[in-house]
Image (cartoon, helix red, strand yellow):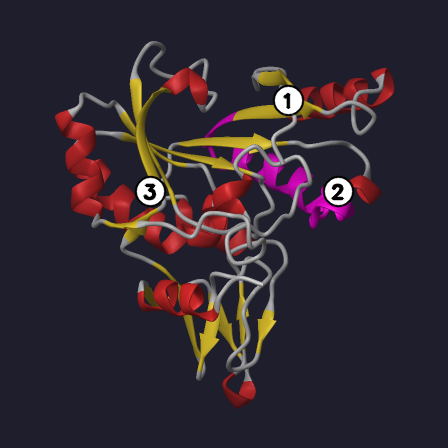
Amino acid sequence: MVPTTAKNALDVLTEPGKLIIPLPNDAVVCTACGHRCKLRPGQRGVCKVRHNDNGTLKVPFHYVSGINNDPIEKKPFFHVLPGSLAMSFGMLGCDFHCAYCQNWFTSQALRDEASTVSYTRMTAIDICGKAEQYGSKSVVSTYNEPLITSEWAVEVFREARQLGLLTAYVSNGHATAEVLDYLHPWLDLFKIDLKCFDAGNYRRLGGDLEVVLETICQVFKMGFWTEIVTLVVPRYNDSDRELSDIAKFIASVSVDIPWHVTAFHPDY
C-alpha cells in the first residue's frame, strides 16, 4: 500500500472538477474516463487521483511529476511540426494497470508502492513559460494518462493558446463523450494507444476495447489531428491476425490516420 501521507499530500494539490454528474446523497459520477466511476463521499476513482470530498469531486491541479522539452516525434507525432520541440508534462495516476507499462513509475502512483510519488508545484504559466523560453512549438500532456487530469490540462492549454502553441494529448483513449466535448475547444492533437484488438485482453489492462474504438472514431470525427500507436507485445497482441484487424479498423475510420507500430521492451 502507498502511505496515506502521500495521498494526503497530493490531495492538497486539487481543485473542484468539472467532469461530474451530481447524484443524491453527495455521490457523484466522474466522467473523465470510460470507467465513469460512481463515487460516494470519501471514495476514489479507479485512477486513485480523483476523489469525492463530501460531495465535491476533487481533481489534480498545480503540479507536475515530470516536465521535459522532447522532440515531437517522441510522442509520437510524425506529421505535425516535424523537427520541433514539444514541452511535455505529466502528473500521477492512470485508469489502466498495464503489466508492461513503460511509464509505470508515474502512472501507477498510489496503486503500486514501488512507483514514484514525487512532484513539483507548477502553474500553467510556469509550464507555458518554459515552452516559450526553450523554443517549444507545442505543449503536451503525457507520461501518465491525461484524461484523468483533463481539468488541469485545459488550464495549461488555455495559457498555451495565448502564446500560439499547439496542444496535445498522449492518451490511452479510454474517454467519454463528456471529456471529449470539454477538451475540444482547447486540444489540437490526439495520440491514442490502440493496445490490442481483443476485448478480453483489454479487460486485463483495466479498459474496454469498445470504448477506445469509439473514442478513435469520435476524435477523428471531431477534427482533432489523430495518430494511433500500437506497442507490439510478444504473445499478447503480436499475431498477424490481430495486427491485420487493427489496421483494417484504422483504415475504416480513415486511411489518412498515421499508425505507429512500436517495439516492446520490458520495463515493469
| Residue 125 visible (yes or no) | yes
Q: Nearer the viewer, mark 1 or mark 3?
A: 1
Furthest-top residue in view? 83
Q: CA distance from mark 1 to mark 2?
A: 19 Å
Q: Quadrant of the N terminus?
A: bottom right
| Disc on res. 202 | 2
Please name which of the two marks, 1 or 2, marks the residue nearer to the observer.
1
Amino acid type assigned to the residue bearing label 2 in the image: Tyr
Q: Answer few, some or many: residues within 10 Å of disc 2's Cα (few below 14, many 20 plus, some between 14 and 19).
A: some
- Amino acid found under the numbered disc labelled 3: Trp
Magenta highlight range: 202-226
Decide whether residue 109 is among the magenta residues.
no
First in sequence: mark 3 or mark 2? 3
Label 3: element kind: loop
Mark 3–mark 2 Cα distance, whole angstroms, equals 29 Å
Q: Is residue 172 left or right of residue 19?
A: right
State the residue at coordinates (73%, 42%).
209
Amino acid at pointer 1: His
Quadrant of the image occupied by residue 81: top left
Rendered position, 2 above or below 237: below
Which is nearer the N-term, disc 1 or disc 3?
3
- Indicate whether 248 appears above or below 169: above
Determine which of the numbered discs, if any, sits on residue 186 in the image.
Answer: 3
Residue visible at 44% across and 19% down in the picture: 74
Residue under the image location 33 percent in, 52 percent down: 152
Quarter of the image where one finds residue 6 = bottom left
Q: Residue at x 69, y 40 (%)?
A: 99
Q: Residues within 10 Å of mark 1 (few under 14, many from 20)?
A: few
